[in-house]
């Protein structure tokens, strides 16, 4: 199938800093609401799961449901951005996020809560894909580092504000955890309005066909593997016919997905893009970073509240060192990259620092002092801040403008995939380690895998449960550390290339002109 591209009616030149900031304001508002909703909920989840009488597996699925939906839809949103107005798609993704938040707030059971998280995840998938595509469309890679640093600051503020707001809401009797979902609604509405007023993009429409079969096979295959990792060890044995059936089904479906993707004209994940060495290496690194980061950190709030016995509000405050490290590293590195044009050193430094932070966090227990915890979390935050956005920058800088949406979506897809797999697998490991360490002791009201309410336990039982959760959480970081090492090794092989000084819209016009010139010259050459 030949893909026809219409040049925009007017190709914009370089934008001033003020114009870029105006265009980015709506994007930053949209990202802020997504980050806020996720971090508010993370700190409230132990209380939510306890109130809904749910299990540790349900705790994991409330998290992985959103991650899975986001992961599966990121490539589809990327394809849709080639067909329809990007601003409209951003507003639609925010609208879905808003609907999911309302459903979650009114949930009376864990089933509806998980479903609402799926709706939120679909909206978050649109934000994840489209924000970075739009940024690259208006900002040249040489200047992108500075604005990526600003987005890092927004990320940090949302991440800092979320746990604090969530803790206060949960600890306020006349509000409660439901307001952790409702509070994002006005922010989502504001982001939709701001986007309408500030974001203007030229329309570049391509004739493409979305591969729904490939997308369906990918989702089904990943779901089969996630169901296995979540239920194995609790609902059935790791070595059982259920394990064989689920893993076999997952592998076959993903194999069929690869076959379909290799044959359709417009695949969800274009396999040809991996011919580019930079894209391949940054994709592998993004997957490993997602696995190590999400898998290692998503259970920290539970560690603070159960192993250390802190309130949700205090648990939110305890995460500040990690967020502070991320804020400083992403902002400072972004400014320096824009000034110097050098970026690989920050990827390597991020890999080293993230590995060190995870390795040190593997030593924690219920008796670890907050001073050491703060140092370890700060190191992890610095490493993540140096890695995540700069991996995207490296890939976007090294692909043709026509493939920029696909490359960005692929990186986001695999980072989210790593996070989904990491959260699911490590959540299952945590549940089984805790159950194993507690032996026959029932801390969950008849369910060995239930999340206990330590405030209702006698002193001796409380110490036993806190010790089990403390050592089990340290084990999760120990499992995550080798993946950080592999991410570091991967980024060492990425070749540093000079950052381009034109944005994606300008590059697309230049590429189209070169193609036309080549066609005009072809008959003469013959």
Image (tube, rainbow, N blue to C red):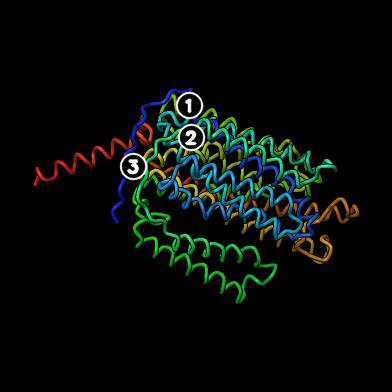
Mark number, residue 149 = none
Of 49 and 308, the residue lying toward us = 49
Residue 58, percent across and down?
Answer: 70, 59
Which tag, 1 or 2, sits closer to the chain's start?
1
What residue do we see at 67% from left, 41% from top? Answer: 185
Which tag, 3 or 1, sits closer to the chain's start?
1
Residue 507, percent across and down?
Answer: 33, 35
Q: Residue furthest right?
A: 458
- Which label lies toward us, 1 or 2? 1
What residue do we see at 81% from left, 46% from top? Answer: 309
Q: Residues within 10 Å of mark 1 (few under 14, many from 20)?
A: some
Q: Circle 2 — which element?
A: helix
Residue 514 figure quarter: top left
Residue 239, percent across and down?
Answer: 61, 73
Judging by the rendered image, the residue that carries numbered circle 2 is 346
Residue 39 figure quarter: top right
Q: Circle 1 — which element?
A: helix
Q: Residues within 10 Å of mark 3 (few under 14, many from 20)?
A: some
Residue 431, percent across and down?
Answer: 71, 60
> What's the CA distance linking mark 3 and mark 1?
25 Å
């Amino acid at each position: 199938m030949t893909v026809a591209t219409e040049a925009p009616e007017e190709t914009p030149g370089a934008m001033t800093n003020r114009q870029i900031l105006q265009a980015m304001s709506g994007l930053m508002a949209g990202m802020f609401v997504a980050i806020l909703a996720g971090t508010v909920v993370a700190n409230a989840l132990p209380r939510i799961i306890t109130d809904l009488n749910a299990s540790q597996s349900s705790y994991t699925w409330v998290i992985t449901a959103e991650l899975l939906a986001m992961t599966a839809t990121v490539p589809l949103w990327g394809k849709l951005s080639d067909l329809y107005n990007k601003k409209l798609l951003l507003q639609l993704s925010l609208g879905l996020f808003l609907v999911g938040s309302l459903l979650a707030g009114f949930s009376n059971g864990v089933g509806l809560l998980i479903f609402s998280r799926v709706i939120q995840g679909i909206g978050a998938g649109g934000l994840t894909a489209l924000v970075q595509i739009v940024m690259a469309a208006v900002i040249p890679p040489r200047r992108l580092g500075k604005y990526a640093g600003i987005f890092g600051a927004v990320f940090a503020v949302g991440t800092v504000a979320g746990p604090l707001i969530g803790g206060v809401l949960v600890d306020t009797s006349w509000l409660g955890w439901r307001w952790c979902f409702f509070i994002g609604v006005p922010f989502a509405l504001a982001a939709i309005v701001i986007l309408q007023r500030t974001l203007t993009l030229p329309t570049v429409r391509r004739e493409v066909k979305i591969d729904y079969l490939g997308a369906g096979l990918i989702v089904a295959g990943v779901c089969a593997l996630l169901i296995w990792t979540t239920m194995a060890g609790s609902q059935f044995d790791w070595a059982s016919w259920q394990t064989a059936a689920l893993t076999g089904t997952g592998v076959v479906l993903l194999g069929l997905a690869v076959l379909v993707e290799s044959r359709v004209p417009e695949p969800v994940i274009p396999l040809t893009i991996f011919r580019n060495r930079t894209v391949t290496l940054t994709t592998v690194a993004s997957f490993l970073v997602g696995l190590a980061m999400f898998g290692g950190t998503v259970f920290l709030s539970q560690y603070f509240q159960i192993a250390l016995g802190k309130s949700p509000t205090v648990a939110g405050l305890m995460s500040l060192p990690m967020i502070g490290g991320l804020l400083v590293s992403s902002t400072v590195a972004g400014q320096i990259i824009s000034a110097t044009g050098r970026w690989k050193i920050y990827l390597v430094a991020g890999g080293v620092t993230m590995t060190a932070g995870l390795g040190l966090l593997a030593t924690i227990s219920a008796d670890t002092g907050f001073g050491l915890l703060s140092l370890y979390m700060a190191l992890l935050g610095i490493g993540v801040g140096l890695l995540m956005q700069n991996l995207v920058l490296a890939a976007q800088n090294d692909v043709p403008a026509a493939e920029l949406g696909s490359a960005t979506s692929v990186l986001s897809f695999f980072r989210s995939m790593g996070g989904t797999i990491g959260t699911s697998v490590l959540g299952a490991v945590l549940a089984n380690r805790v159950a194993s360490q507690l032996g026959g002791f029932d801390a969950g009201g008849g369910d060995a895998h239930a999340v206990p309410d330590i405030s209702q336990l006698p002193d001796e039982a409380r110490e036993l449960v806190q010790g089990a959760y403390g050592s089990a959480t340290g084990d999760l970081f120990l499992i995550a550390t080798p993946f950080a090492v592999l991410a570091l090794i991967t980024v060492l092989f990425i070749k540093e290339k000079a950052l381009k000084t034109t944005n994606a819209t300008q590059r697309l016009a230049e590429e189209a002109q070169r193609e036309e010139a080549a066609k005009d010259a072809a008959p003469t050459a013959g």
